[in-house]
C-alpha cells in the first residue's frame, strides 16, 4: 500500500509537469506498477531517488565540478560513487559531501583519480555495455530484472540490488561477465534468502581489485579473514565475499 508520503511525492511530481499531467499520470501508473514488484518497494524506490537528488544537489551547491565527473547510483540508501576526478582532494570532498546528506547508509567509493586510461582497439562504450546487460536480464525469464541496477564505468560493471536467491544472482553475474567490453564485474547485491552481500566477480584475465567502502567514523569493523571485508547495510554489518 502507498504511504501518504509516497502519494504526496507522486502528486507533487505530476502537478509540477503542468500541461503534461495526462501523460505524467500514465507514466506514474507505470512507475507504481513496476515498483510494486520490486523487492525494495515503492517507498524504497522513492527514498533512493530522493537521496540521489540530494547528493547531486549538495555537490552542485558546494563543488559543481563533481557533477560532470562523477555518477551517483543509489539502492536501499547505499550510495555508489563512480567516475574520475583530477585530484585526491576532489575525491575526498565528494565522499565528505555525500555523507552530509541525510539518509545515506553507506558511501561506496569507486572513484578513480588521475587521467583516464587510453581507449584500446575494439573499445565498447560504457552506455552500450549497460544497455546490453540490462536488455539480456530483461529478456531472461529466470531473472526479475527490476530488482537490479547496472552501472558501467570504464569497462567495470557495477551491479546493485536484491536477488531473490543465489541462483538468480549467479545468472545475473554470468550475463555481465560474458558481455563484450566488460573488464570486471563488481557485485553489491544483497541475496534475499541469505541476506548476504557479494563483493566482486573477476574475469580470469583481469587482476583482482579491492573494493573501497566509506563508512561513518563511528562504525568499527570486526576482524575478518583475509580476502573478506565488511559492508554496512542498515543497522548491522554484513560480509561480502570475493567470488572467483
Image (cartoon, helix red, strand yellow):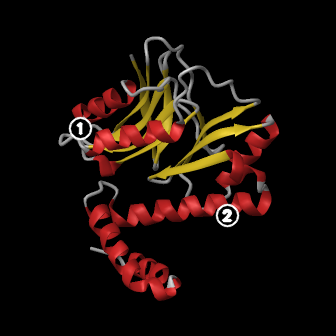
| Quarter of the C terminus within the rendering | top left
Q: Residue at 42% across / 26% down in the picture?
A: 180
Q: Is residue 203 visible?
A: yes
Side of 109 where 65 appears, left or right? right
Nearest to the eye among marks 2 and 1: give it.
2
Rendered image quadrant of residue 238: top left
From the top left corner, tell me how far across and down residue 85 is, in percent. Answer: 74, 39
Q: Quadrant of residue 64?
A: bottom right
Q: Which residue appears at 18% of the width and 43% of the height? A: 141
- Residue 97 lies, in percent from the top left, at 71, 53
- Disc 2 + disc 1, Cβ < 8 Å: no
Label 2 to label 1: alpha-carbon separation = 36 Å
Report x, y in % for residue 65. 77, 51
Query: Visible in this render: residue 101?
Result: no
Residue 135, percent from left and from top: 33, 43
As drawn, the label of residue 165 is 1
- Image height check: is 198 above or below 232? above
Residue where numbered disc 2 is placed:
57
- Labels in figure, total: 2
Work out whether residue 111 or residue 182 is closer to the camera in this orientation and state it.
Answer: 182
Residue at 42% across / 78% down in the picture?
Answer: 10
Q: Which residue sits at x=78%, y=42%? A: 90
Q: Which callout, 2 or 1, points at the residue further toward the start of the chain?
A: 2
Amino acid at each position: 500500500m502507498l504511504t501518504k508520503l509516497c502519494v504526496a511525492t507522486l502528486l507533487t511530481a505530476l502537478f509540477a509537469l503542468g500541461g503534461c499531467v495526462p501523460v505524467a499520470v500514465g507514466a506514474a501508473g507505470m512507475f507504481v506498477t513496476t515498483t510494486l514488484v520490486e523487492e525494495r518497494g515503492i517507498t524504497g524506490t522513492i527514498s533512493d531517488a530522493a537521496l540521489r537528488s540530494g547528493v547531486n544537489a549538495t555537490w552542485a551547491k558546494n563543488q559543481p565540478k563533481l557533477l560532470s565527473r562523477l555518477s551517483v547510483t543509489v539502492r536501499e540508501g547505499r550510495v555508489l560513487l563512480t567516475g574520475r576526478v583530477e585530484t585526491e582532494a576532489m575525491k575526498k570532498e565528494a565522499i565528505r559531501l555525500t555523507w552530509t546528506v541525510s539518509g545515506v547508509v553507506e558511501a561506496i567509493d569507486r572513484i578513480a583519480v588521475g587521467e583516464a586510461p587510453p581507449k584500446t582497439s575494439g573499445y565498447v562504450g560504457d552506455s552500450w555495455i549497460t544497455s546490453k546487460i540490462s536488455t539480456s536480464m530483461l529478456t531472461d525469464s529466470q531473472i526479475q530484472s527490476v530488482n537490479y541496477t547496472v552501472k558501467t564505468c570504464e569497462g567495470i560493471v557495477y551491479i546493485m540490488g536484491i536477488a531473490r536467491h543465489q541462483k538468480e544472482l549467479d545468472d545475473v553475474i554470468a550475463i555481465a561477465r560474458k558481455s563484450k567490453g566488460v573488464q570486471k564485474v563488481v557485485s553489491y547485491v544483497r541475496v534475499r534468502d541469505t541476506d548476504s552481500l557479494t563483493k566482486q566477480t573477476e574475469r580470469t584475465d583481469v587482476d583482482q581489485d579491492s573494493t573501497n567502502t566509506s563508512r561513518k567514523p563511528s562504525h568499527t569493523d570486526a576482524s575478518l579473514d583475509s580476502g573478506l571485508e565488511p559492508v554496512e547495510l542498515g543497522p548491522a554489518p554484513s560480509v561480502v565475499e570475493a567470488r572467483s
